[in-house]
Image (spheres, grey):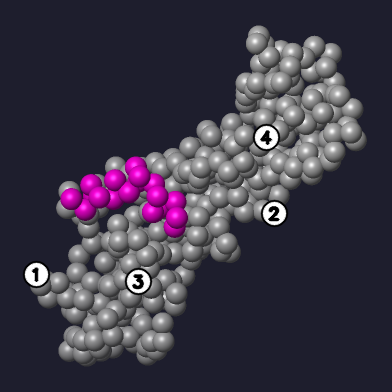
Amino acid sequence: MGIELGERSQRLLRILIESYIREGQPVGSRTLARDSRLDVSPATVRNIMADLEDMGLIVSPHTSAGRMPTAKGYRLFVDSLLTVQPLSQNEVKRLQYQLGNIGDIDNLVSKASELLSEVTHMAGVVMVPSPAALSLTHIEFMSLSNRRVLAILVLNNAEVRNVIIDTQREHTKSELEQASNYLNAAFAGRGLAKVREKLLGEMRQTKTDMDSIMQAAIEMADKVFLADESPKADYVVAGQTNLMGFQDWSQVERLRHLFDAFNEKRDILYLLDGCLGTDGVKIFIGEESGYKILDECSVVTAPYEVEGQRVGVLGVIGPTRMAYERVIPIVDATAKLLGHALNRG
């Protein structure tokens, strides 16, 4: 930020912000002088507070003689003054247990968002993982009427999906078995993104290079795997109503606009998607997100990975007056545990 503070100024700013996050009330000079345990007078504290206010780090509300941090002050606090402690082993084990016995990906994502909300008492958001998070375990075909075939896919060793496809001709049970045997041999264990990539390569071959079973298998796999090559991004949110409990957001109109943003999803999805390319935890405070609806919010995000590839982002949305030292390690640990749970599949 290009702001350099002396040791006393740093200490007073840190104590002011910690007090405001804890109590939600502007902090006066007498309180700071007492809590800082510095051998300085309230007058000296007032002078330092005036300097911090001139720098745009704190502000004095019209209704109070105390001061509260600005978004700029929170940013300096998070970047320079905050000490983040990792979660205890018991806390990590609890999160791990909650995510450990869920095989279905949709339920796993929903549970992760609920956990973020439950532990932080704010809104938890989790992007639905991209196809790279899914791997093909097994595929079978079953003949239906009118040249239709039911494709039964087992993904990540646990999740079963059924897809009905239309074929160019009727297929015998033997042909369908041979087609599934071919596809299982060629693609089982591969991520769906890799399956699509290899399928496109297979489809570029001239049909004279393929026998009839291979042709039928590729045609059916084309309908199963390539029909939705660019699925719509989405996320799951939990705990929006928690935000109603913060006095910072007592204005109904402000909350209504924020809840509308959760429902419309576009802006928040763009923000989460932009974090896919970042390493570790990323924090947006106030206007830093670039989305007006989040100007009064802080957003703490982290990407999660499957087989070393980032496939989604999760995070917590709350007021700028959030306990960053607590929220940051929770988001970081949950991202790692969700990736581990998906990898286990």
Q: Is residue 269 above or below residue 29?
A: above
Residue 96, position in %: x, y? 58, 43
Mark 2 vs mark 3: in front: 2
Q: Which residue is mark 3?
A: 74
Residue 95, position in %: x, y? 53, 44
Residue 302, position in %: x, y? 52, 57
- Ranked by sequence position, the earlier of labels 1 and 4 is 1
Q: Nearer the viewer, residue 223 or 279?
A: 223
Count of number-bearing discs:
4
Q: CA distance from mark 4 to mark 3?
A: 47 Å
Q: Which residue is mark 1?
A: 63
The image quarter in which residue 29 lies: bottom left
Residue 200 as seen in the image, left or right of residue 48: right
- Ranked by sequence position, the earlier of labels 1 and 2 is 1
- Pick the quarter of the image with the C terminus: top right
Q: Callout 2, which amino acid? A: Gly
- Pick the quarter of the image with the N terminus: bottom left
Q: Callout 4, which amino acid? A: Phe
Q: Callout 1, which amino acid? A: Thr
Q: Callout 3, which amino acid? A: Tyr
Q: CA distance from mark 3 to mark 1?
A: 21 Å
Q: Which residue is mark 2?
A: 308
Tell me if residue 68 can be seen.
yes
- Residue beneath the point at 39% across and 54% down: 267
Q: CA distance from mark 1 to mark 2?
A: 52 Å
